[in-house]
Amino acid sequence: MDATTMLMMMETVVTQVPQKAAAAGVTGADLVKAGALIGAGICMGFGAIGPGVGEGYAAGKACESVGRAPQEAGLLTRTMLIGQAVAESTGIYSLVIALLMLFVVGG
Amino acid sequence: MIELEPHQWEMLGRYLGAGIALGMGGLGAALGMGNAAGAASNAMMRQPTQQGELRRTMLIGQAITGDASIFALVVGLFILFFPAVQPEEVGGNFFAAMTGAGIAIGFGAFGSGFGCGFAAANACAGVARNPRRAGQTTQSMIIGQAVAQSPSIFALVVALILIIRQAPGTDLATMGVCIGAGIAMGVSAIGSGMGSGQTAGGAVLGLSRWPRSYGVTLRTMLIGQAVCETPAIFGMLVAFIMMFAMQDIPEGILGFAHMLAAGIAVGFGGIGPGIGSGLTSGPACVMAATYPRRDTLILRTMLIGQAVAQSTAIYALIIALAILYVV
């Protein structure tokens, strides 16, 4: 199989899916809802990466400190939790936006 | 409008799926093995008399690191050569099943391969630091790496199920199920694999410095790794729900969007919490080895920290379930 055939196959797949969808009767409202759904998925999925890594890093440092200074465990845990709560904020923004897209905009 | 012939759909799915499986699956293992080889070279420079022991540790570590990419190779061969059930009815569903299986095992093997490299690298450094305890260091490395492989085993299971339950014809909702399940399982396994590997790396590092705290360190490592696996388990749960428990998927493009969105949410949502849990339990294992008498306190702090770091994975699971069942 040469390169032209391969390219033609790829092109066909790309053009064929929407055309089949049109044959099945896709309306604009359907597309808007599909966009809102995928948007919510991307929003929550990618939005969860940062807080997860950041909170884990903070907790790792807290574990090190607790190991070195066990008498300060209460203070260190409290500081860790406050820091994690702040790092969590962008995750909660993503959750709110995803819920908005699912139930208010797309619904 | 050009219609694709069944054998064209078949070839397209097989080539794309096998490419993703081996491309991504090989990448992680290669990075991990390179990490181990670099650490081994560094260690040999410091301890030229221990070259034999170091080469042995490096090769054992690399062999286990390569397991994930061997899973990817097996699934890649299945994708290429597993016979289509009804060859004359092959359509978009077969294409999506093969692509989804490739995504599942390709991304799923990436994390485990990359993560196991940390443990192998730290084991080489540890053998150089404490050659008399080489046996114990290698042993803890093998245990840690074996647990860190589990996300890629989950991905292997999901990929094989996707290949075997191929459906004939072309139907956007079924295509969405295959690709969504692949993304949910494969991408969420990246974080778990890397996190578990980092935990094993921390434990090996700590044990090579403080060989006497073997039991305490191993316990901390296994608990930490178990928490790191959570995002991959969420991903597998959503993949199984999509494949087996969905009753009424909307027709057409809307069904495709539902499945893809749920897969993206839980899949990518699992990366961060997995890596973050590993960043927590890695240092916790080092500390448990250093101060074995304070292990209860360290374990408690580690579990609180990991629980908070998992919260975004739980949000992602909630959003995915809301997409599947509510909207």
Image (tube, coloured by chain):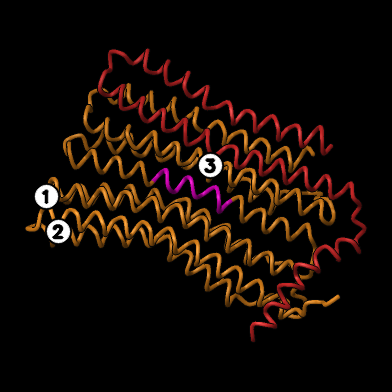
Residue B282: quadrant of the picture:
top left
Q: Which residue is mark 3?
A: B231
User: Which chain: orange?
Assistant: B
For residue A90, above or below residue B19? above
User: Which chain: red?
Assistant: A
Span shown in magenta: B185-196
For residue B302, above or below residue B154? above
Q: CA distance from mark 2 to mark 1?
A: 8 Å
x then y, percent, for residue B20: 55, 65
B198 relative position to A43: left or right: left
Which disc number belongs to residue B131? 1
x then y, percent, for residue B113: 40, 56
- Amino acid beneath label 2: Glu
Identified at 50% across, 27% down, the residue is: B308
A25 relative position to B214: left or right: right
x then y, percent, for residue B150: 45, 51
- Chain of the residue on which disc 1 is drawn: B
Instruction: Return the disc, 3 or 1, that comes first in the chain's sequence.
Output: 1
Identified at 80% across, 63% down, the residue is: B171
Identified at 74% across, 72% down, the residue is: A11
- Chain of the residue on which disc 3 is drawn: B
Instruction: Return the disc, 2 or 1, that comes first in the chain's sequence.
Output: 2
- Amino acid beneath label 3: Pro
For residue B311, above or below residue B123? above
Q: Determine whether label 2 and label 1 are within 8 Å by CB.
A: yes
Q: Which residue is mark 2?
A: B53
